[in-house]
């Protein structure tokens, strides 16, 4: 990967997407480090085809809390075997807890979350954490593990940010930081760049001023520019630091 380029640490693709065009657009904006997330069995199957075809794209895999119906007794061994047989799978995620969409299966979510954290420990891989309306349970589970990773799509208060940082986690900063009604900029003013990475979560959460359009990894340049403005810093410095943070986390990236 290119240390002197932007990094999208989290985006989603489907085989039906125009992937060559997406990569081209990204490269035109100097977004050369691309880390895709696949978090259901269907997504993982498609993602494997994509990373085997396109050398520019790396992958994290896991079962999202919205997809726990995918999880069974063989899932952990399946994920483990995929990692062991493909050097481009560089992390476990996105995994975690989501009490916004699902409030009636909290115990199942927590159990499956822990099993995937155990897998990350066994494989010595970083994790990508999804947490929505579940801060306390997410934090209390993570503090029992000595793992590193990213809190995906972080948008919480400074108190939550500092607790995750104390555990050694990076905060994934995306399009929400550009929204006009977002409180995130006031939080980011008080967080050192060394704790941040950039992500689009595309095709979702397009940043301003392209919020009405389908998101894609090239929009990391918009997110980086906005973060530089928030931090009263230069675009180049934000790019270098956030990319360094990402590459230091994902040790399997070449």
Image (cartoon, helix red, strand yellow):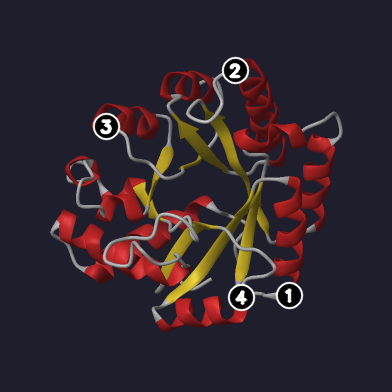
Q: Residues within 10 Å of mark 2 (few under 14, many from 20)?
A: few
Q: CA distance from mark 4 to mark 1?
A: 10 Å
Q: CA distance from mark 3 to mark 2?
A: 26 Å
Q: Nearer the viewer, mark 1 or mark 2?
A: 2
Q: Are marks 4 and 1 in contact (CB under 8 Å)?
A: yes
Label 4 SS:
helix
Residue 233 position in % (x across, y down): 17, 62
Reading the image, the residue beneath label 2 is: 104
Q: Residue at x 55, y 54 (%)?
A: 250
Q: Nearer the viewer, mark 4 or mark 3?
A: 4
Q: Find residue 53 and name its label.
A: 1
Q: Nearer the viewer, mark 4 or mark 1?
A: 4
Label 2 SS:
loop
From the viewer's perspective, is residue 143 above or below residue 43? above
Q: Residue at x 26, y 32 (%)?
A: 157
Q: Find residue 157 and name its label.
A: 3
Reading the image, the residue beneath label 4 is: 19
3 or 2: tag closer to the N-terminus? 2
Q: Are marks 3 and 1 in contact (CB under 8 Å)?
A: no
Q: Which quadrant of the figure contains the C terminus? A: bottom right
Instruction: Please say whether residue 191 is visible from this viewpoint.
Output: no
From the viewer's perspective, is residue 140 above or below residue 196? above
| Front one among 135 and 91 | 135
Q: CA distance from mark 1 to mark 2?
A: 40 Å
């Amino acid at each position: 990967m290119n240390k002197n380029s932007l990094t999208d640490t989290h985006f989603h693709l489907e085989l039906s997407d125009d992937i060559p065009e997406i990569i081209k657009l990204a490269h035109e904006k100097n977004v050369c480090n691309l880390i895709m997330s696949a978090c259901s069995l269907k997504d993982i199957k498609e993602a494997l085809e994509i990373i085997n075809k396109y050398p520019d794209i790396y992958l994290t895999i896991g079962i999202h809390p919205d997809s726990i119906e995918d999880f069974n007794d063989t899932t952990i061994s399946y994920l483990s075997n995929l990692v062991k047989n493909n050097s481009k799978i560089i992390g476990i995620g996105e995994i975690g807890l989501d009490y916004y969409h699902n409030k009636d299966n909290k115990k199942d979510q927590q159990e499956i979350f822990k099993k995937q954290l155990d897998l990350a420990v066994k494989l010595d891989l970083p994790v990508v954490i999804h947490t929505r309306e579940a801060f306390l349970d997410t934090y209390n589970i993570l503090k029992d593990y000595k793992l590193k990773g990213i809190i995906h799509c972080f948008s919480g208060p400074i108190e939550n940010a500092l607790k995750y940082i104390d555990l050694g986690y990076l905060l994934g900063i995306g399009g929400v930081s550009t929204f006009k009604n977002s409180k995130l900029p006031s939080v980011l003013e008080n967080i050192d760049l060394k704790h941040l990475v950039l992500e689009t979560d595309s095709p979702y959460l397009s940043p301003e001023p392209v919020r009405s359009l389908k998101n894609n990894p090239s929009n990391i340049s918009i997110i980086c520019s906005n973060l530089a403005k928030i931090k009263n810093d230069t675009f180049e410095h934000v790019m270098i630091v956030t990319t360094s943070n990402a590459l230091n986390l994902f040790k399997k990236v070449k």
